[in-house]
Every structure is written in C-alpha cells, then in structure tokens.
Image (spheres, rainbow, N blue to C red):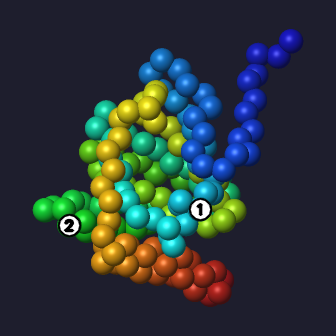
Amino acid sequence: MSSIETYKIKEKGYQPFLIREEWQIAQLNYTEEQDIENINKIDIHFETDEAFVLLSGKAVLITAILEDKKPTFSVKLMEYNTTYNIPKNVWHNIAMKTDCKVLIVEKSNTHIGDFEFFYLNKEQISNLKEKVIQAFDDDLLIGEEN
C-alpha cells in the first residue's frame, strides 16, 4: 500500500484538486477564456496570496493597479522553475497559449467566494492585449538570438 497520492489534471480550465484546511493546489490548463483574444476582466482576492508555477507552454501574468476604474497594467512572461506570487489585494489575470498548464497554490476554497471581477472596456482590453502580445513577441525574439 502506497502513501503517495498522485494527481494528473487533464481537463481544461481551473481545477482545484488538493484542498486542505488552510490551503489548496489547483491546476489551470489552457482554456479559451485565458487566451489574450478573449480576456475581458481582471480579478482580485482579499484573503489570500496566489502563487503560480508554469508547468508547460507559455503564459503571461498580468497585474493591474486600479484607480478611478482605470487599470494600469504590468505583465510578466512566466519562466519555468520559477514561482510567482500575486499578493492579496492585487488585481490580476493570466494570458495563456494553447498548450499551457499552470500550478496554483492559494488559501483553501478561494475559488468559492474570495474573488471580485473588474470587467474591462474595449480600450482597456486593447491596451492589455498590446502589452501581452509584446511580452510573447519579446520571448520569440530572445529565443531567436540564442
């Protein structure tokens, strides 16, 4: 009898799979909603940080400062073997390419109620899309130089 629990998450989207009293692990597999062509909102958690680890593919973490309902975006192309933490009370989202899988660690049951959405208008979506596409394109240029 083995004491090792094994999890393989194959479904698209956000899948919490290891939930304990204080924390949970989830996997976010590419879903059309996370494609930069479809992102139309950012979200925030008030009770937990959220840590991200890139498992496969390409993804860009998005953070935003929201003042007077106007977001100022920052983007970060994720790298393998790196843990990224989004502190609580920071607006964020993640743009993913089709083969992308990301591991997420956060306070338990965050997906049930500790979130709020801010929906972006067309101009904000366009601004965000430009920044994310540039981050993906910069990665392609770096890859060509090596």
The image shows residue 106 at horizontal and vertical percentages of 45, 35
The answer to whether mark 1 and mark 2 are in CB contact below 8 A is no
Do we see residue 94 in this rendering?
A: yes
Drawn side of residue 43 relative to residue 34, left or right: left
Checking the image for residue 74, the label placed there is none
Do we see residue 81 in this rendering?
A: no
The image shows residue 32 at horizontal and vertical percentages of 59, 62
Specify the amino acid type for callout 2.
Answer: Lys
State the CA–CA distance, disc 1 to disc 2.
25 Å
Give the quarter of the image for residue 89: top left
Mark 1 or 2: the one toward you: 1
Specify the amino acid type for callout 1.
Answer: Glu
Q: Quadrant of the N terminus?
A: top right
Kindly identify the residue that appears in the image at 41 percent across and 47 percent down.
Answer: 85
Q: Front-most of 146 and 75?
A: 75
The image shows residue 51 at horizontal and vertical percentages of 46, 44
Please tell me how many numbered marks the rendered image carries: 2
* Label 2 neighbour load within 10 Å: few <14, some 14-19, many 20+: few
On screen, 121 above or below 26?
A: below
On screen, 141 above or below 65?
A: below
Q: Which residue is mark 1?
A: 32
Kindly identify the residue that appears in the image at 73 percent across and 45 percent down.
Answer: 10
The image shows residue 124 at horizontal and vertical percentages of 31, 73
Q: Mark 1 or 2 closer to N-term?
A: 1
Kindly identify the residue that appears in the image at 36 percent across and 57 percent down.
Answer: 42
Q: Which residue is mark 2?
A: 70
